[in-house]
Image (spheres, coloured by chain):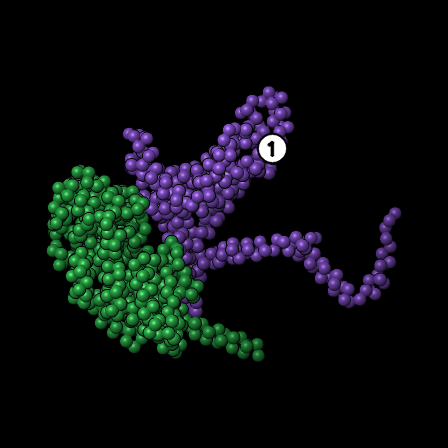
Chain colours: A purple, B green
């Protein structure tokens, strides 16, 4: 039996000096706060500070603004900013332009996210194989991602305007009104543009993930009689699932923050608000029109929407990962 | 004891806040007298920057103890966005020589502007220099928070070569009435003299209506603003006539619905443009142009035709410490001599009484600009009312939906927008 007698340690503890007890208590507190490896916390601290200053504080402040009659003022200006409850939320939700922008971004995500996953996985798989000009293709897909939106948008305007290359090729099949001024086609065109522009980055993620799929699995599948397509479905797709979750989440988050494309490509969310995104409307109301309280309410609704969407996606795509 | 400390702290905080507040009390009076170095911001326009540099150099050589530092407005999506951010951050310069009249009410609400009336000769100076036009720049509290500086009366520019190709008289083109304008536009497009008769930006930014609807509305109504006496004016018969005119232009594809990257008039894509004299410098050597007043339904004579001013003004910002110097610089920069140099260097019209009579030599040397100087006497500014930008965006949304894209009857769209605008005007 290795049970210790209950009476043994007591005299020794009583004899311990007060300074030692304090040191021990401090160590216990530090251990609780900083964990077993305090040096790790030191390394993480700068990023935590960055997160707190750049994301957490503005987010909390946005929530505060959304519940107040808030506008920006010069330092020292004394103004009343009363608590208004959900008034700002009611105002933005009863604004058809805001509701339309959320619908628009829903359409955008519905096209952009699946297209991004399918194309980037397919192309990454192709680029991972030993094909000629592999490096050239990899660079080609990546170039639009690193090129400034303003420059690329200019090219797309020439491609998709009424007398652009696309309509010239399509001839009588060209839509009327043309792509970017057609209420039904403006948002899908933007979704396709963004998919193409971002593809290089997501291909890169998949290429990295593909390096971790064991060759043994492909050999085993081959020995079991699986062809290329079956190997892709049964080995590649499950093998890159963590990357797929990442791609889906990143595409959703960046897509929900859509701003530059409707701002530049369709002249401020046109035609008639058919391509306005919540962030664009947020900019118009919050910055241009001087109503940051309404802008914040839209922002908070967008954050909640994206979180819900991300959870749903996680349930469908992630499951056990 | 604890209560006393709290009360003292509160009093100190309130005193500090009151002291920091832009425009009130003894500190504001002291600031109005204070002299020393100041900073000013200029627009990014090349010609204006050149004028600004010489103005600052001239001031600095005469006042070495009150040095002025000039810089271009920092880059942003728009100057107004940058200025708004600077006001909030408390680092706006003393003077900005590019303050949009449409943003003044917002900057004023932010506590970012100094009323020029706070200077003993402020009101007098503004009204003596600009005359009765200055009235349009008064804020709702009756004070001047901006000095009307220069305007660019918007007119119809036309490409003489394109007009000649379509067999249209290039000296006196038929553009005075809506019917004439439409017939001329049809001829231009049918003759393939240009792809579009005219190409106002069809995009949805709030300010785009200043260059399609508003000049024609000002002309049709004989000088009415979009909002007057707290009520919208654009849903009137005159406003609907203007909207229907533009609707015809878009419906017949005489004006395109798609955004154009570049300058459609310079590129020859459009045979006409709605623009002010600032653009003349950019057309030099590229387009052989002429200019006429904007059309009206009945074809008013030029001497009775109003238009949009497209003015840019100078405002003093509340972050300014040495307001005495800032006010002196403002008067120096808008003196007869400096206004003359601005006109010489940029072709833009100083917002002062009788520009043509004040600088006769310039207009003798530059006859192209004479019609703009005449037009400068009949300009309409954007209304200086609360929620100005929101009002313009509301109007633009309705205009875009009905006039540009034809998804609603223009008259009904203007009626709907008028209701919303009236509500916005009534809000603080």
Relative horizontal placement of residue B74, taking residue A239 as reference (left or right): left
Identify residue for label 1. Answer: A213
Q: x, y (%) of residue A125?
A: 53, 31
Q: x, y (%) of residue A277?
A: 40, 46
Pointer 1 chain: A
Residue name at image x 32 percent, y 30 percent: A170
Q: Residues within 10 Å of mark 1 (few under 14, many from 20)?
A: some
Q: Is residue B166 visible?
A: yes
* Residue farthest toward the top in the current orientation of the protein: A225
Residue name at image x 34 percent, y 68 percent: B57
Q: Nearer the viewer, residue A120 or B268?
A: B268
* Residue B355 to residue A63: above or below: below
Q: Secondary structure at mark 1?
A: loop
Q: x, y (%) of residue A150?
A: 39, 46
Dividing the picture into quarters, in which one does residue B58 lie? Answer: bottom left
Residue name at image x 73 percent, y 61 percent: A25
Residue name at image x 42 percent, y 45 percent: A148
* Residue B273 to residue A110: above or below: below
Relative horizontal placement of residue B233, taking residue A277 as reference (left or right): left
* Residue B178 to residue B46: above or below: above
Which image quarter holds the C terminus of chain A?
top right
Q: Is residue B183 visible?
A: no
Q: x, y (%) of residue B120?
A: 29, 77
């Amino acid at each position: 039996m290795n049970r210790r007698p209950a009476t043994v340690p007591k005299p020794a503890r009583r004899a311990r000096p007060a300074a030692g007890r304090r040191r021990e208590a401090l160590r216990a507190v530090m251990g609780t706060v900083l964990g077993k490896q305090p040096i790790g916390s030191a390394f993480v601290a700068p990023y935590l500070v960055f997160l707190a200053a750049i994301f957490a504080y503005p987010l909390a402040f946005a929530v505060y603004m959304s519940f107040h009659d808030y506008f920006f003022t010069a330092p020292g200006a004394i103004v009343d900013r009363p608590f208004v409850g959900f008034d700002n939320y009611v105002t933005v939700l009863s604004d058809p332009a805001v509701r339309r922008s959320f619908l628009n971004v829903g359409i955008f995500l519905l096209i952009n996210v699946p297209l991004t996953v399918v194309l980037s996985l397919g192309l990454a798989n192709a680029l991972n194989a030993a094909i000629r000009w592999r490096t050239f293709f990899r660079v080609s897909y990546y170039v639009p991602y690193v090129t400034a939106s303003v420059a690329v948008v200019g090219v797309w305007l020439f491609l998709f305007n009424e007398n652009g290359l696309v309509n010239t090729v399509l001839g009588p099949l060209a839509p009327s009104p043309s792509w970017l001024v057609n209420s039904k086609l403006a948002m899908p065109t933007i979704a396709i543009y963004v998919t193409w522009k971002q593809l290089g980055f997501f291909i890169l993620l998949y290429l990295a993930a593909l390096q971790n799929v064991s060759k043994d699995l492909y050999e085993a599948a081959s020995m079991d009689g699986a062809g290329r397509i079956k190997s892709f479905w049964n080995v590649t797709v499950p093998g890159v699932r963590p990357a797929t979750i990442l791609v889906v989440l990143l595409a959703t988050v960046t897509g929900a923050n859509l701003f530059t494309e409707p701002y530049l490509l369709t002249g401020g969310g046109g035609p008639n608000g058919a391509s306005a995104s919540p962030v664009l409307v947020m900019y118009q109301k919050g910055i241009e029109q001087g109503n940051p309280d309404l802008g914040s309410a839209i922002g908070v609704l967008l954050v909640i929407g994206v979180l819900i969407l991300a959870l749903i996606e996680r349930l469908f795509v992630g499951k056990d990962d | 004891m604890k209560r006393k400390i709290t009360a003292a702290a509160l009093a100190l905080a309130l005193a500090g806040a009151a002291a920091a507040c832009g425009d009130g009390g003894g500190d504001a009076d002291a600031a109005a007298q204070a002299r020393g170095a100041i900073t000013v911001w200029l627009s990014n326009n090349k010609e204006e920057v050149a004028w600004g540099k010489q103005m600052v150099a001239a001031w600095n050589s005469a006042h070495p103890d009150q040095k002025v530092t000039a810089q271009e407005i920092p880059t942003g999506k728009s100057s107004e966005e940058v200025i708004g951010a600077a006001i909030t951050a408390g680092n706006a310069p003393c003077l900005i020589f590019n303050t949009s009249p449409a943003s003044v009410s917002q900057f004023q609400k932010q506590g970012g502007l100094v009323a020029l009336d706070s200077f003993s000769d402020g009101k007098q100076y503004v009204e003596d220099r600009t005359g009765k036009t200055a009235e349009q720049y008064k804020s709702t509290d009756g004070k001047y928070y901006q000095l009307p500086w220069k305007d660019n009366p918007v007119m119809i520019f036309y490409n003489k070569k394109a007009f000649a190709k379509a067999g249209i008289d290039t000296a006196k083109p038929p553009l005075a009435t809506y019917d004439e304008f439409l017939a001329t536009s049809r001829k231009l497009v049918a003759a393939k003299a240009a792809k579009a008769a005219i190409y106002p930006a069809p995009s949805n930014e709030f300010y785009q209506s200043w260059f399609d609807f508003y000049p024609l509305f000002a002309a049709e109504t004989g000088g009415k603003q979009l909002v007057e006496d707290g009520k919208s004016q654009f849903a009137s018969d005159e406003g609907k006539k203007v909207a229907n005119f533009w609707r015809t232009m878009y419906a017949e594809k005489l004006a395109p619905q798609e955004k154009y990257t570049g300058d459609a008039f310079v590129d020859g894509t459009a045979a006409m443009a709605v623009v002010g004299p600032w653009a003349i410098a950019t057309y030099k050597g590229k387009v052989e142009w002429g200019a006429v007043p904007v059309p009206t339904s009945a074809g008013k004579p030029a001497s009775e035709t109003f238009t949009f001013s497209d003015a840019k003004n100078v405002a003093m910002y509340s972050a300014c410490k040495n307001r005495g110097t800032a006010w002196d610089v403002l008067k120096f920069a808008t003196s007869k001599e400096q206004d003359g140099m601005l006109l010489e260097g940029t072709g833009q019209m100083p917002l002062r009484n009788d520009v043509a009579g004040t600088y006769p030599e310039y207009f003798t040397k530059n006859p192209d600009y004479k019609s703009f100087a005449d037009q400068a006497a009949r300009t309409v500014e954007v209304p200086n009312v609360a929620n100005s930008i929101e009002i313009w965006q509301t109007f633009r949304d309705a205009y875009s939906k009905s006039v540009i894209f034809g998804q609603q009857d223009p008259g009904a769209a203007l009626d709907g927008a008028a209701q919303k605008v009236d509500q916005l005007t009534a809000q603080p």
